[in-house]
Image (cartoon, grey):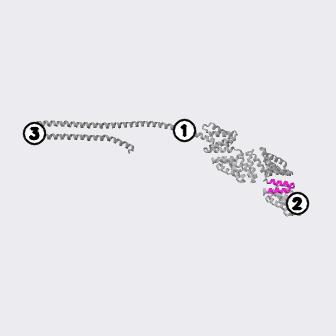
Amino acid sequence: MIEPRIKIRLAVVAMVALVPMTAFLQASESAIEVTSSAAGISVSNLQQSSAENNTNSENSEGTNIHTLHNTATNSDVEIQSKLLDLWTLFSDRWMDYISLVLQFVGVIATILSVLILIVHIKENKKQDIYKEAKTSAKNAADAAATAQRHLKKIQKLEHKANKIYQGMNAQSTGENPAETTQKLQTIQIDPYATPIDEENYDAVSLQQHNKREDASKKWHAIAQITEGSDDALAAHAYFSVAYLSPAKERDKAIDCYGRAIQLKPNFFEAYYNRAVAKFKLGLTKDALADYDRAIELNSEDARAYANRGSAKFQLGRLEDAIVDYDRAIELNPDMAEAYANRGSAKAELGRLEDAIVDYDRTTELNPDLVEAYANRGSAKAELGRLEDAIVDYDGATELNPDLAEAYANRGSAKAELGRHDDAIVDYDRAIELNPDLAEAYANRGNAKAELGRHDDAIVDYDRAIELNPDLALAYSNRGNAKAELSRHDDAIVDYDRAIELNPDLALAYLNRGGTKAELGRHDDAIVDYDRAIELNPEDADAHKNRALVKMILGFHVEAKLDFETALELAQYTNRADLVNKLEQILHIFSATNGD
């Protein structure tokens, strides 16, 4: 199929070729017409000559022949002359046409030559362009290969850099100083280090030189610069700002950890650290939620389980707390803090022996963990192992001579052993270390009261209540001191307040009952004793005191039953002094009533 452009070109050539052919036909027609005209003239002349010859036939034969010959000769000459003219004209026309055709052919030849030259030039140019393109393509391929090699090298270096920068923040800097120093040295010699990399270097270096505030500002600048373009880096920067925040700015730290989580939703360390900050601020439920999320992100982190256990412990979910401590210990059998905290949870549940086992394991793993000794001492004290308790408190105070609670608890153990003066010395040291330790004042008041120093005791109770107005036991004991000073009405006011603060404080009912009995309010006294025994059925003193009041009221049978119950309880608790008193009372009772 001929393309349209070629068709048009052929049509033009055909039209040009048609011009000489038309001219040739026109010239041939003209020649024929001229020849025919000449022939017609010759015939006419011959006919005329023949007629004239017939008319003059009578002339002589010689003359006629001569005339005819001349006429014929003249006619032939004339015909030949015309024929020659016609041939000349015909030849000229043909020459013109031939010349025209040759000129046309020459033009065509010239055009074709030009076209061929153009095609040749284009072909050569095309070859040159092809060669040049081929060379360029080869060069481009070589350049691409070189670029690919460089790209792989850069990607390798970038991957190496990413491994260096990954997790590189304020926390990792503090926890792994040697590793951080090595990373910084790598950044220093990295030819591909960007300005942001250098900013990271500066931030970490500042922290290593203990310029925490300057480091925090640098991290904050990095966070603002990279947020939106490199959210992962920005997240680590916000994390670092939070990590470096001082304790008084925990709210700010929580906000920055939150921002880090928004930029990097699966940021385990951010959830974990935010939970720690919330827990320290007393936001225990919020902390628990963050620990839950942290464990979802990393179920193999022992710290998260241990700290979540502490949050549950704080919320009173002791059994759940123990489950978390179990998991923490399973993941890290050498985690001393998990054993210590599990021991405390068990102690709160009254599982004192199990608690001591955990404390023992704690001190094996970490002989310098002060809290383990102090808490083990408390567990032993509750089990009545007072001397062993004092040994543990001694260990705690040796490890930390400034641990006020250890001195206070050792004072209580000594007081239980009747060593009240030694107890007061420990309470004095505890108060010196922590003047706001309400329990130390309250217990020192108890020791002073045991020594008969009731006025001094009341002063300590006053201070304890001032520091902690909700300390019910301090009100009850102050009531005892006032009662000893015969300030019975004031004593009852204190007992009332103690019961108001703690309606289940059996000791307050017992003491109020005794004071009412001193005032002769026996029926009211029995009501208080009843409540005390209801709250603590194994209190031998409550049964004894109620029996005494019942005897006064004449309820001898009931009184005897209370005395017998009190004796059984005293014997069970190895209270030899009370046992002797009760036996004497029953002996007198039997003698008096004939039993």
Position of residue 164 measured from the top left corner of the image (x, y, whole percent): 63, 41
- Where is 549 relative to 301, above or below? below
Reply yes or no: does residue 368 show up in magenta.
Answer: no
Kindly identify which residue carries mark 3. Answer: 58
Q: Residue visible at 17% across and 40% down?
A: 46
The answer to which of 475 and 414 lies nearer the viewer is: 475
Mark 3 or 1 closer to N-term? 3
The residue tagged with tag 2: helix, strand or loop? helix
Q: Are marks 3 and 1 in contact (CB under 8 Å)?
A: no
Nearest to viewer (mark 2 / mark 1):
1
Q: For this rendering, which residue is in front, 9 or 146?
A: 9
Q: Amino acid at mark 3?
A: Glu
Residue sitting at x 43%, y 36%: 125
Q: Residue at x 37, y 43 (%)?
A: 8
Classified by dominant secondary structure, the portion drawn in magenta counts as: helix
Q: Which residues are magenta?
A: 472-499
Q: Amino acid at mark 2?
A: His
Q: Which labelled disc corresponds to residue 587?
A: 2
